[in-house]
Amino acid sequence: MLLTAAHGPAPLFDLGTGQGARQFTELAIALLLSSLIGLERELHQKSAGLRTHTLVGVGSALFMEVSIHGFGAVVGLDGFSVDPSRVAAQIVSGIGFIGGGLIFVRRDAVRGLTTAATIWLTCAVGMSCGGGLPLLGAAATLVHFLVVRGFPLVTRRMATGVPVTQRVELRLCYRTRRGLLGRVLELCTRNGFRVTDVQIDADSQDRTGHGKVKEAGVVLSLEGRGPAHPLVEELTEWEGILGVGLRSQGDSTE
């Protein structure tokens, strides 16, 4: 309930006491800007998309509106002081829980950092709109698109001609008891790749009635600066190799 010293409690649906056209416009701008950021994440199939970013932006804007206009009931009363910045500080602290839930580590590769950062930025955009600074919010939204979509183009151009470390998964199905696995590891090392992980694919094993494994599958995680396709070409010609597959192992932080 809002309260002014001269007029007493304000009507519940009074459009002139912190819930008028200006405040609705600020929420609408927060909705638009946060939706643009969320749509970009959604189109690139990130873990937090349109709905999450929109709710974070609008929610942050609403918290700011409440912080600025929602404590009129205690303004002017003895023994009470209102500090709108306290709510803003709690918004920044609380958004960390959502961002932290988007970050995970898989095989030493950190994922979700960029999406968590966009959640944090969307929160700031919503706060700026709710705080009466929509131009700053719009500028921050433009910065988001510049950083997330423009910077990769610049880095790729700068990295032209510079070898980039690749992470790939090499999947093999081969006949056992021929020493093939050791020869495969030697081939990978000879071609400049470092083997970071070896996993036996138990589902591809075929056991005979004598309990002896005749076929086996293995997944090799490799790191190197050269192309991995020559490995596939050579392995397909080896006797005892039944199948070869190659998959890029992305290490993007998005």
Image (spheres, rainbow, N blue to C red):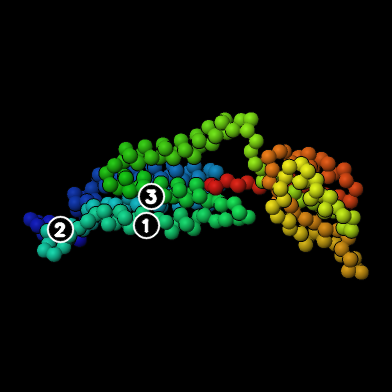
Which residue shows up at 50% across the image and 50% down it?
Answer: 113
Using a 10 Å C-alpha cutoff, classify the residue at mark 3 as few (fewer than 14 neighbours), some (14 to 19) or many (20 or more): many
Which residue shows up at 12% across the image and 58% down it?
Answer: 76
Q: CA distance from mark 3 to mark 1?
A: 11 Å
Q: Which residue is mark 1?
A: 93
Using a 10 Å C-alpha cutoff, classify the residue at mark 1 as few (fewer than 14 neighbours), some (14 to 19) or many (20 or more): few
Whether residue 38 appears in this view of the structure is: yes
Rendered view: 72 above or below 186? below
Residue 80: which quarter of the image? bottom left
| Residue 123 numbered mark, or none | 3
Whether residue 49 appears in this view of the structure is: no
Q: Nearer the viewer, residue 12 or 102?
A: 102
Q: Is residue 46 left or right of residue 188?
A: left
Q: Secondary structure at mark 1?
A: helix
Count the labels in the image: 3
Q: Provide residue 152's location: percent of width, then percent of height.
A: 54, 36
Residue 13: which quarter of the image? bottom left
